[in-house]
Structure formats: C-alpha cells, structure tokens
C-alpha cells in the first residue's frame, strides 16, 4: 500500500486523492492519499517530513518551483520545464505536459500550425507552452508579469510574448492563471472581446467544472474543455512512474471514461 499525498496552498477541493486511488486500484495496486493545504511558512518542515516518510507526493500551485531545491535530481519534463508535480525517492518529475496534450487529443483538438494564446506563465504554463510549441503550434503568451513570459521565451525560444492583450484571432485560448478558482471564483482573466475571437477555450481549472472563463466562451458558441481530463491523465502518467510501468494512451482514455462514469456529478 503506497503512502501518498498532495501539497498545495489550498487543496481542500482537489480530486487528486479520488483519481489516484481509482487509478492505482485499476492498475493492480493501492494507496492512502492525503490532501495537505500548506502555508508558505510550513513548507520546509512539511516537505522534509514527506521526503522521509512517504513513498511519493504530488505538488501543485504554488509550490511546483519551490520544491526543486529539496530534490536530488529532476528527470524528463521536470528538467525541461523547471517545474515539478511529482516527487518519488527525492527525484522530481512533471507529468502536466503529457496530461495536457492527451486531454487535447481526446477532445479532438489539433493545434499544429495554429495560433494559441496561453494566459499565464507559471509552473503549469511552462509545461503547456513547451508542449504546444513542440507540437507545432504558434504560441503566444500573456502574463500580468511580462518578465515571467519573457523568461519562458528565453528558455524555450519559439513563442511570442504579449505585453498587452488585444482582440486578435486565435484558434485556442488556454487559461493557466488559476483565476476563476477559490477566492477568484466567478472571475475570468479575459472577457468576451478576447474570447469571441477564438474557436476553443481550455481552462486548467476543474473546480468549478465550468469556470467563468468557460461560461463566457460557451455563451459565444465556442468549444470548451475544463482541466479534469488533464488532471486525470497527469495522475495516470504519474502512477505509471510510481509502479514502474509504461503508460498507454488508450488505457488512459479508457480509465478516464470509467472514472467519469463512476464519479459522475
């Protein structure tokens, strides 16, 4: 029985425990999974305890970068993105990008050669931007702190930084800012003027299921996708790392469909 946990600023509404417990059971294992909402001043002591006493743990907003100095090594996408969402044996991994791209694929969204606007350049934004760019999308990044987007441009190169937003045509707009959840629920990072010019709107938020960002897009007749699929798929990829098995996209899709049937709202 694996002893697992999730740390973040406020993870009280997270579905991670439910997803990992379901996944691991279906994959022939089992786990206990603890949700730990963590204030900045408690981060150091909590991480040291997790590293010493847990088999592995997940990391979410706002600690995906803060965790790095505590780790022995970064592997795969964690090394590429400079952000971590899974820690096992003192090694940092990042499955966000794989989860995001599989979510797009399973929703029939193809981005190669198309203009995509990414709102936000934080931990999740890094993985989204790099994966979209690698898949051939024309990526535009906007962040309230322009220097964050410029840092991504220096690291990954093939993207354009926007210092301000204007009404331009994009195939897809992706919200990775976190605006629309917790204390900002009911707010959207952009309004109708921006969303009216895209074909698809994707929000990494999944609580609420339909953020204000997605609600506006839907009223405008746009295709909308929330972050539940990404969360499930990145969890699946992470669980494969824990079990030392190769991930399978078809298996992941089947498990997600079964999960949604079992836990339908």
Image (cartoon, grey):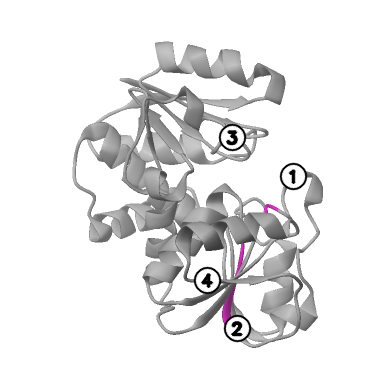
Tell me the residue that label 1 is attached to.
182
Task: Identify the element where label 1 is drawn.
Answer: helix
Residue 173: say if magenta. Answer: yes
On screen, residue 207 versus residue 131, left or right, reads: right
Tell me the residue that label 2 is attached to.
170
**Residue 214 quadrant:** bottom right
Disc number for residue 63: 3
Q: How far is mark 2 from mark 3, CA to CA? A: 31 Å
Whether residue 265 can be seen here: no
Residue interval drawn in magenta = 171-178
Location of residue 11 with respect to 232 vertically, above or below: above
Q: Position of residue 245 (x, y in %)?
A: 19, 41
Please say if the residues under marks 2 and 1 sit with CB atoms less than 8 Å apart: no
Location of residue 10 with respect to 159 vertically, above or below: above
Q: How far is mark 4 from mark 3, CA to CA? A: 25 Å
Task: Identify the element where label 4 is drawn.
Answer: loop
Q: How far is mark 2 from mark 4, CA to CA? A: 14 Å
Q: How far is mark 2 from mark 1, CA to CA? A: 28 Å
């Amino acid at each position: 029985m694996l002893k697992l946990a999730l740390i973040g600023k406020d993870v009280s509404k997270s579905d991670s425990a439910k997803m990992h417990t379901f996944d691991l059971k279906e994959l022939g294992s089992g786990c206990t999974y603890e949700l730990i909402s963590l204030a900045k001043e408690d981060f150091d002591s909590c991480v040291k305890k997790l590293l010493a006493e847990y088999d592995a743990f997940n990391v979410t907003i706002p600690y995906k970068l803060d965790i790095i100095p505590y780790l022995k090594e970064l592997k795969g996408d964690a090394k590429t993105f400079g952000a971590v969402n899974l820690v096992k044996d003192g090694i940092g991994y990042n499955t966000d990008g794989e989860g995001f791209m599989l979510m797009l694929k399973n929703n029939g969204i193809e981005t190669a050669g198309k203009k995509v606007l990414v709102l936000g350049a934080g931990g999740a934004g890094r993985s989204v931007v790099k994966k979209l760019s690698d898949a051939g999308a024309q990526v535009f990044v906007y962040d309230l702190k322009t220097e964050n987007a410029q840092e991504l441009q220096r690291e990954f190169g093939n993207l354009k930084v926007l210092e301000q937003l204007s009404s331009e045509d994009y195939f897809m707009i992706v919200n990775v800012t976190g605006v629309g959840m917790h204390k900002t629920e009911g707010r959207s990072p952009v309004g109708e003027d921006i969303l009216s010019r895209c074909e698809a709107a994707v929000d990494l938020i999944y609580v609420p299921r339909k953020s204000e960002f997605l609600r506006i897009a839907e009223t405008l007749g746009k295709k909308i996708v929330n972050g539940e699929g990404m969360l499930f798929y990145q969890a699946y990829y992470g669980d494969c790392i824990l079990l030392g098995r190769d991930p399978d996209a078809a298996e992941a899709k089947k498990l997600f469909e079964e999960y949604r049937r079992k836990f339908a709202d």
